[in-house]
Amino acid sequence: MTPVSISQESNRQESIKKELDELLSMAERSTASIDRLIDTRQETYLRSIGYILVTGILVLATGRAIVVGKEFGLGGAAPFVGLLVGLLTPYLVVAVVLQLRKLKRTESDLKLERHIHGRLVSLLDEQSRRMDREPLSLVERVTIDFRMKRLDRTTV
């Protein structure tokens, strides 16, 4: 090999390494985004269930208060309880609707991010195969391997 071709080969190897590193960085950010979206989805889902439970409990408690009030002649408290539930229930219904919209938006974002992640992993696989033909130190090879293994989100 001539000195020029050795230099070109070295530049090509460095270019492949740089591209692989950039792809790994993008895939790691995508993985972090997927993890964050999954956490947001779980929090939103639990919050929605909480609002639904509170609304149900308020409605049941109101019904119970009205029935008990009529049985024991305590009708004076029923309007107050009814007013309280009448004010809180619409708020809780709106909160549930907003949480469900957020959940839908989060699911959409998660689907998109998983698609992007899948494409990045595919590109990484192609780039990794190109790197297999290049001489790498053991440390470089293991570092790349570990970074790629951390990207696996097939079970999430």
Image (tube, helix red, strand yellow):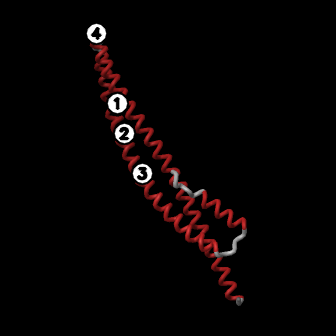
Earlier along the polypeptide chain: callout 2 or callout 1? 1
Q: How busy is the neighbourhood of tag 3: few (under 14 within 10 Å), some, or many (20 plus)?
A: some
Q: Amino acid at mark 3?
A: Glu
45 to 125, vertically: above or below: above
Q: Which residue is mark 2?
A: 96
Residue 111 image position (x, y, % from top left): 43, 56
Q: How busy is the neighbourhood of tag 4: few (under 14 within 10 Å), some, or many (20 plus)?
A: few
Q: Amino acid at mark 1?
A: Leu
Report how far apart the C-alphas of labels 4 and 1 lie in the structure: 25 Å
Numbered mark located on residue 107 in the image: 3
Left or right of 120? Residue 10 is right
Q: Which residue is mark 1?
A: 88
Q: How busy is the neighbourhood of tag 2: few (under 14 within 10 Å), some, or many (20 plus)?
A: many
Numbered mark located on residue 51 in the image: none
Task: Identify the residue at horizontal 37%, vertical 44% (top origin).
Answer: 100
Residue 83 image position (x, y, % from top left): 30, 25
* Number of dots carrying numbers: 4
Q: Which element carries disc 4, helix, strand or loop? A: loop
Report how far apart the C-alphas of labels 4 and 3 lie in the structure: 51 Å
103 to 85, vertically: above or below: below
Earlier along the polypeptide chain: callout 1 or callout 3? 1
Q: Which element carries disc 1, helix, strand or loop? A: helix
